[in-house]
Image (tube, rainbow, N blue to C red):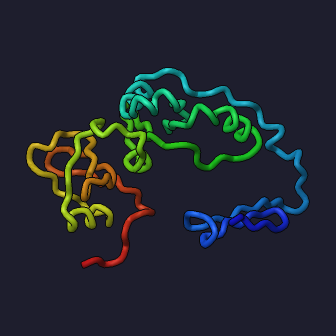
Amino acid sequence: PGIDTEAHCYRFMPHRLRGEGLFVAVIRKPGESGDNKKAAKKEKSPKSKPSPQLAEAAKWLTDAARDNFEIYAEEDRINAFPRLHADLLRKLKKEIDVIHEGVLIGNVKGRDIIPSQSLALSPLLRPDAFPSCPLDRASALSYLSGEAVSLPDGTPRGFVRLDYDGRPLGFVKNIGNRSNNLYPAPWRIKSKIN
């Protein structure tokens, strides 16, 4: 009940299930067989060798997250994915291009890890992992618009989590005389807000 099916698709109707609704379909390009380039793709060895960055990123997560999630690095990304489904993810990666997996903890740049927006909004983040700074409504809207945010004197240098009304918004990097807004550009509010 609440799920309508048609040929190769599912519709999860919002008036019959909790949530906003969802549509899932299976699509295949004409002329391609199931034995395409993905089947011939060599199995990659995991690039998740222990590193100081991986250990540092793990410290940002709650104890429950460290116990129940695999924390691994791929290319310049550090992710957390539920251990329960890690084997399924590995099998899927052999067959399809996985665009997004688990929670992106951060991106490695040199010796630093830039914490991600996904981490800021995730319940996996330890509340005390980063210094936090509460914002008023006007400052929160400025941050969400991608503008620079003035931090109070005495705010520690480095990554700072910004909060509004007790909820996390994202991160800035405090470099002393100013802070760099790390809110993702595609998510920024572009319209004028009063």
Q: Position of residue 106 (x, y in %)?
A: 43, 40
Name which residue lies at 41% across and 61% down.
185
Left or right of 48, for residue 63: left
Q: Position of residue 140 (x, y in %)?
A: 25, 62
Looking at the image, which residue sits at the far left? 153
Q: Quadrant of the C terminus?
A: bottom left
130 versus 48 height, above or below: below
How many badges with numbers are in the image?
Answer: 0
Name which residue lies at 40% across and 29% down.
63
27 versus 13 height, above or below: above
Looking at the image, which residue sits at the far front? 1
User: Would residue 72 be seen by someone viewing this image from the given angle?
Assistant: no
Name which residue lies at 54% across and 30% down.
70
User: Would residue 28 be seen by someone viewing this image from the given angle?
Assistant: yes
Q: Position of residue 52 (x, y in %)?
A: 40, 23
Q: Position of residue 125 (x, y in %)?
A: 38, 40
Left or right of 183, for residue 30: right
62 versus 9 height, above or below: above
Residue 25, quarter of the rendered image: bottom right
Left or right of 44, for residue 172: left
Name which residue lies at 52% across and 30% down.
68
62 versus 36 height, above or below: above
* Near-viewer residue (8 or 110): 8
Q: Quadrant of the N terminus?
A: bottom right
